[in-house]
Structures are given as C-alpha cells and as structure tokens.
Amino acid sequence: MSKQTVFSGIQPTGDIHIGNYLGALRNWVALQDDYDTIYCVVDMHATTVPYDPKELHDNRVLTAKLLMAVGVDPSRSLLYFQSQVPQHAELSWILGSMTPLGALNRMTQYKEKAEKAGQMLGLYSYPVLMAADIMVHKAHAVPVGDDQTQHLELTRDLAERFNNRFGDTFPIPEQITPKRGARIMSLQDPTAKMSKSDADPRGSVLLLDSADTIVKKFKSAVTDSGREVSYDQEKKAGISNLLDILSIYTGRTVDALVDEYADAGYGPFKQAVADAVVDGLAPIRTAYNSLDDEEVGRIMSRGALDARTRAEHEMADVRTKVGLGG
Ligand code: ATP
Ligand code: LTN
C-alpha cells in the first residue's frame, strides 16, 4: 500500500523557537519514517503582516537551514518555498469562492494579528491559503501545534464542501499534535504562547541561542510566588510549562520530575531545565553550522521543481472538476 501524505508549513518570520520545535517540528522529523512527507517554508503567509523584503528573503534561507538542522532530511522529505509553487495560490482562489465569511470572522489568530497589522484581505484569507497548501498535495495528516486547530477545522470543512460539490477529490486531513508540548508558553508570560513575533526576546528560547543566553532566559522565567515545584496549569502556569519542557527534553515523566524537584527551590529547578535544553539544542547548532547556504539554496530549488510537478498533477484534476480544465 502506498504511504499516506503528511504536509506542514512554517512561516519564515524569524528565528525558530523551542515552541515551534516541541509543538510541530519534532513530529515533522519523526513522521519521515512512515509517511510521504512534504514540508514547506510558507513565505507567502509571511507577507500577510508588515515586513521588510530583505529580511524576509534572508529569513527564508535561515528557516530552511534550521529545518534541515533539526532533522528534516531532503532525501526523505520534499522541502520547498511556497512562493515557488504557484499552484498553492491558484487553489486558494478556487477555495475562496467556497469559504463563508462567517468562518473567517471567527478566526482568533486573525483577530489578534489584525489588531497590530490592520484589517487586510491577505491576513483575513490567510486560513484559505493554508487550506490550499494542505489540499494541493491531498495530504492526510498535518503536524502542527494546537494554535492551528481552528485553521485545520476550516481546511476539513473546505475539503468536505469541495467533495460534496465536485465529487470525491480530497482526503479530510487529520491534525497531529504531540501529547505534551502542543502549546509551549512564553517564559515571560505563561498565559500567552511562545511566539516568534513576541516583542520581548526573553519570552522565547531560540534553537540557536548560546548556552549562556538559554540559562539567563530560564533563570528570568516568570513563575509564581510559591516555593513548591508541582504541576497545575492554572495556578502554576509558569512552573507547569517548565515541567513540560523538562519532561520532553529528559524523556522522564512529569510525576518523576515533581518527585525529584518538589522541594528543590525554583532556582535549582530552573537551572536543571536550562541544562537539559542546552544539551538538547547542542546537536542542532552543530548541524546548522555544517550547512552551506548555497547548497541549501540548490536543495530548495530542486524541492520546488518536484513540488510543482506534484501540485500541477493535482491541480489538473481540480481544474477539470470545477470547469476550468483545458
Ligand atoms: P508567529 O509569531 O510569526 O505567528 P509562530 O511562533 O506562531 O510565529 P509559526 O511559523 O506560525 O510560528 O508556526 C510554526 C509551527 O509551530 C506551527 O505548527 C505552530 O502550531 C507551532 N507553534 C508555534 N508556536 C508554538 C508554541 N508556543 N507551542 C507549540 N507549538 C507552536
Ligand atoms: N498557519 C501556520 C503555518 C502554515 C501551515 C500551513 C501549517 C501555513 N500553511 C499548512 C500547516 C499546514 C502557522 O501559523 N503556524
């Protein structure tokens, strides 16, 4: 039986942080063993908020390199820049005619981002382009963090609408989120998710942060005024976030960690979290430093060529079905 297809995307909006890694990218890597995996640097999505063209251009290569450094392997996964495969935008247009405004009005990410970026059509229709990304490859599953749940629901709804109207075409894609780490919180505000676009750099631990910086960031992490290390996402959101991070990086259960650190004091506990993260990130930094920008560029161009061939095959079918065939 042929393998099922996995698709996911990440915006080249800046340095990748451990939230991106723990919520999504480590699944991208793990799924390469059993699925036909397609991963995309979604550069057109990054133009939906104010940006600097030179910065975007540089961030695309940075993001591609970081993806390879964490273990996305171009010999096993298709990896490319979204803008180099115009079929994404083409399908987005077709899906736009099937998207009720009510569905877009409910999107919390739009509401949050529009407050800063202004109410722009591109930002508003962002989830439709995301649905097109997934559907243009007829993907079955999408590894993402839990902030993408609403967008995935819209994608499933659009796939169903299309199938009902034009005949069975698209799989209804499943969301894949990790049991722990689906929503890593900011170190400075444990009620908000860690985010690339956070104005306070101390809120996020970046994959390429030095050991020193990582220790400083964890030491200054906002916790609560108590003394006991215990897991309670409401009353002890900061400590619970750190326990989640430590649990993933050490492979130990939260219960075992609480047993060990309950009375250790926040200082030594934070140091233990920082040490585990420093160890976990070291191989990523080494892999990143061994990558050559030009070689990465060539890999991305080859990826786009293959992705265009695949997407064009699917779009030929879609065009015929919707009455736009040749
Ligand atoms: P931005 O702030 O520019 O929106 P972001 O940090 O939210 O960026 P994205 O490029 O939008 O990052 O997301 C890439 C992947 O990382 C997505 O699958 C998203 O769900 C996941 N992700 C983002 N933030 C977190 C987080 N704090 N915890 C877990 N997963 C996350
Ligand atoms: N909206 C996502 C990025 C994204 C994506 C996708 C994820 C764009 N297209 C397709 C999965 C599949 C985000 O903001 N994290």
Image (cartoon, helix red, strand yellow):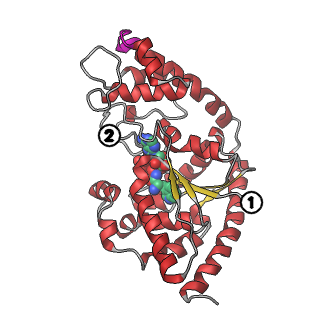
Q: State yes or no: residue 174 in magenta.
A: no
Amino acid on which disc 2 is placed: Ala
In the rendered image, residue 205, in percent from the top left (x then y), is placed at: 46, 32
Disc 2 under 8 Å from ligand 1? The reply is: no
Proximity of marks 2 and 1: CB atoms separated by less than 8 Å: no
Disc 1 under 8 Å from ligand 2? The reply is: no
Q: Is residue 204 left or right of residue 172?
A: left
Disc 1 secondary structure class: loop
In the rendered image, residue 80, in percent from the top left (x then y), is placed at: 64, 57
Residue in the picture at 45% in, 75% down: 161
- Name the residue carrying label 1: 1
Residue in the picture at 72% in, 53% down: 299
- The one of 182 and 206 positioned closer to us in this rendering: 182
- The one of 141 and 88 positioned closer to us in this rendering: 141
Question: Is residue 210 in sight in this rendering?
Answer: no
Rendered image quadrant of residue 255: top left
Please tell me whether mark 2 or mark 1 is closer to you in this view. Answer: 1
The boundaries of the magenta stretch are 262-268
Q: Decide which of tag 2 and tag 1 comes sooner along the chain.
A: 1
Amino acid on which disc 1 is placed: Met
203 versus 99 height, above or below: above
Question: Is residue 178 in sight in this rendering?
Answer: yes
Quadrant where the N terminus lies? bottom right
Q: Is residue 95 left or right of residue 1?
A: left
Q: State yes or no: residue 265 in magenta.
A: yes
Q: Which mark is residue 252?
A: none
In the rendered image, residue 93, in percent from the top left (x then y), is placed at: 48, 77
The Cα–Cα distance between marks 2 and 1, rounded to whole angstroms, is 43 Å
Disc 2 secondary structure class: loop
110 versus 75 height, above or below: below
- Name the residue carrying label 2: 192
198 versus 82 height, above or below: above
